[in-house]
Image (cartoon, helix red, strand yellow):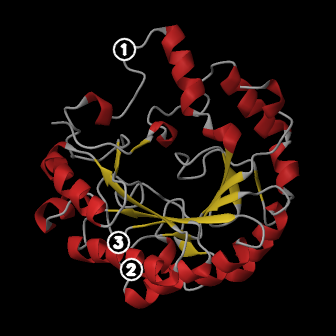
Amino acid sequence: MPQDTVEGKIPDFFSIETVLGCNLSCAGCYTGAGLVTRQQGVMSFTQYKAIADNLKAYAKKVCLAVWGEPLLNKDILEIIKYTIGFADPYLTTNGQLIDETLAEKIVDSGCVNISVSIDGCSQAVYEKYRRGGRAEKAINALKYLCASKKRLKSNIGICPTFLVFEHNEQEMADFAELCHSLELEPGFMRPFRIENSALQFSNKTKYRPLGTAGLSDKERKKYILEKEEGCFERIIILVDGSVVPCCCDYNGQDIFGNVLEQSILDIWQSKKFCAFRKNLLNGKDVCKRRNCFMLNRQRNVLPDA
């Protein structure tokens, strides 16, 4: 990792929390598990535009979600359309709100990529994680998006994702078959370890959360650098404009500034943020977390035989 990332070049990837809140209560999500103590809210288009104008000179990619369902924001389509003027907009969604009409609007909006989370094909399996959701709605959302993409001859990327646990392993093959029937690649992912979750992780090593338990000091230092890579490659902006080091700072414990009040470059180059990144480069686990979501790499693979 180049040294100039501490005080030099600002990242071109931003995640902006356009909504803090969700229509589901997913067991392995900080919001769904009730661990987020920040006040829930929706970012207005006026606020988003001010933030976007602040970072547009640097941004190439903008994910419009952090710890909430972005489609709960009534201005999300307008937000997407504004974003394409300076960067590639990305969405992640549980798909529960997507009907045929909204699917067409999303595809037609200029959104570059949309990730749809589907962690089970049957309702009994799906609802163990996606509490309050309907498997049929999520699957139909995927189908509506694919149909709109074909009809509008769009290049939008559609990424179906599946968090692998012990309880849903038996439906991995069904999920893969569904994806391939729609000419999509299935994305099998590791869940991340959170408190208050009674879900059992997969017995397959490649789908188990990573952590520092049992690592030597040398291995742990390498792990810390790898897991915090996102601090150097992406900037996280919460719903109130606060800038935090990574997605796992879900309650804003380490705030480096606010993009509604300061320039993003001043925040990136601030003594506090630079010191934080320098400590990470030196192998210090300054955020005191062991489950950073930056290690949850998407795995576009078929289930093991």
Horizontal and vertical percent position of residue 122: 14, 65
Q: Quadrant of residue 278?
A: top right
Q: Earlier in the sequence, mark 2 or mark 3?
A: 3
Left or right of residue 78, residue 163 in this image: left
For mark 1, what is the residue?
Answer: 214
Indicate the secondary structure of the residue bearing disc 1.
loop
Indicate the secondary structure of the residue bearing disc 3.
helix
Q: Quadrant of residue 204?
A: top left
Horizontal and vertical percent position of residue 189: 36, 45
Q: Considering the image in quadrants, where does the N terminus appear?
A: top right
Q: Quadrant of residue 3?
A: top right
In the rendered image, the vertical position of residue 78 relative to residue 131, given as above or below = below
Left or right of residue 280, residue 36 in this image: left
Judged by depth in the image, the label closer to the viewer, 1 or 3, is 3
For mark 3, what is the residue?
Answer: 142
Horizontal and vertical percent position of residue 85: 77, 73
Label 1 neighbour load within 10 Å: few <14, some 14-19, many 20+: few
Q: Earlier in the sequence, mark 2 or mark 1?
A: 2
Give the residue at x 49% y 60%: 67
Tag on residue 147?
2
Give the residue at x 85% y 42%: 270
